[in-house]
Amino acid sequence: MLRMSTNAFEFLCGKIKKINQVKDYAQGTIEEQLITFLLILGQNFKNRVVGFFLCRSGETISRYFHNMLTGVIMLEEEFVKQPSGRQIQEHIRDNPRFFPWFKDCLGAIDGTHVRVKVSKVDAPKYRGRKDWPTQNVIAACSLNLKFTYILAGWEGSAADSRVLQSALTRSDPLTIPEGKFYLGDAGFGLTSKLLTPYGRTRYHLKEYSQRGPQTSKELFNHRHASLRNCIERAFGVLKKRFPIIASGSECQYSCATMTNIILACAVIHNFLLAFDPEDNIFHYEDNRVGDPNQSEGEGDSHAPENMLLGLEYRKGEALRDLIASEMWNAYQYGN
């Protein structure tokens, strides 16, 4: 019910105690507060349900939850770190399908929508492609499904490219070292630091189940999709473990609180990757989303026309063409 093993729970308690942000109450230890917090995140229980289980009032459960929410967020600096780019990711280094062409890849970037509770006045700008108000969450993750950056709070009607631009220019920005890049879907603009697939070319993994790549662009799109699905799998694990952020469920929290909840869930997700890596949920998503017959996200395979201008686009286009050409030559020679 807590979505983690006993050993992981005890270790997380120790981490929270060390930061001295959450205190023991006379009738409520840090362990009980963490249990309360994890029950709400992992089961999407309302306060009165958890209060019934633990014989506590709704006000007490709410206080425990918000105390622990603050405490877990304070672990962000330790568990949600941006990559330095000095090392080649193991998944690429050990796979001849990707090395050396993607040796500078840091991971993947994508957005997801999480339901929020807003006033009727604000509802229209938070209502995007869903029938209910959502916030657009942009996240970056490494190829081992660890979140390296997450930005929540934007209105559901905001485009992914606009949220990404905010992430790159804010005071605590998404940092991409020189010469490195992330992979993104066609909803983003192509640059030298964010490689997107070729437009008007097969892209989804399921499209290659019957016939292999026939051109350099198709080969690039196929391998790009194979790597980029790490962000789809990471979101899948996050939403399966913490149904409180599943977009289809009714939300009882304000936009500001939900923003903090999303960040806290990402912190716990990364913590469990390090301290509970054998969790079956990670293998479930590997088998489900990593299946080559599964569709690769919801992005359009045509790049937005207003993103196809400028120096950064031309640099990204040159890099993408170089990778595609070299991969295709090796692919033909290998065959």
Image: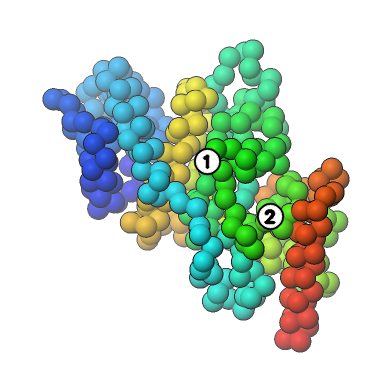
Q: Amino acid at mark 1?
A: Asp
Q: Amino acid at mark 2?
A: Leu
Residue 177 location (% of width, % of height): 59, 58
Identify the residue at horizontal 78%, vertical 81% (top origin): 329
Quick one: SS at disc 2?
A: strand
Identify the residue at horizontal 73%, vertical 47% (top origin): 188
Q: Is residue 134 left or right of residue 56?
A: right
Residues packed near mark 2 inside 10 Å, few (<14), some (14 to 19) or many (20 plus): many
Where is residue 35, by image quadrant? top left
In this rendering, the answer to whether 212 lies above or below 36 is: below
* Residue 241 visible: no
In this rendering, the answer to whether 28 lies above or below 151 is: above
Q: Which mark is residue 194?
A: 2
* Residue 167 visible: yes
Residue 150 location (% of width, % of height): 53, 43
Residue 181 location (% of width, % of height): 64, 59
Instruction: Tell me the quadrant of the picture where the N terminus can be found.
Output: top left
- Taking depth in this image into account, of 208 and 253 the one nearest to the observer is 253
Identify the residue at horizontal 65%, vertical 42% (top origin): 164
Q: Which residue is mark 1?
A: 172
Q: Is residue 27 left or right of residue 136?
A: left
- Taking depth in this image into account, of 85 and 57 the one nearest to the observer is 85
Q: Is residue 228 left or right of residue 276?
A: right
Identify the residue at horizontal 27%, vertical 20% (top origin): 60
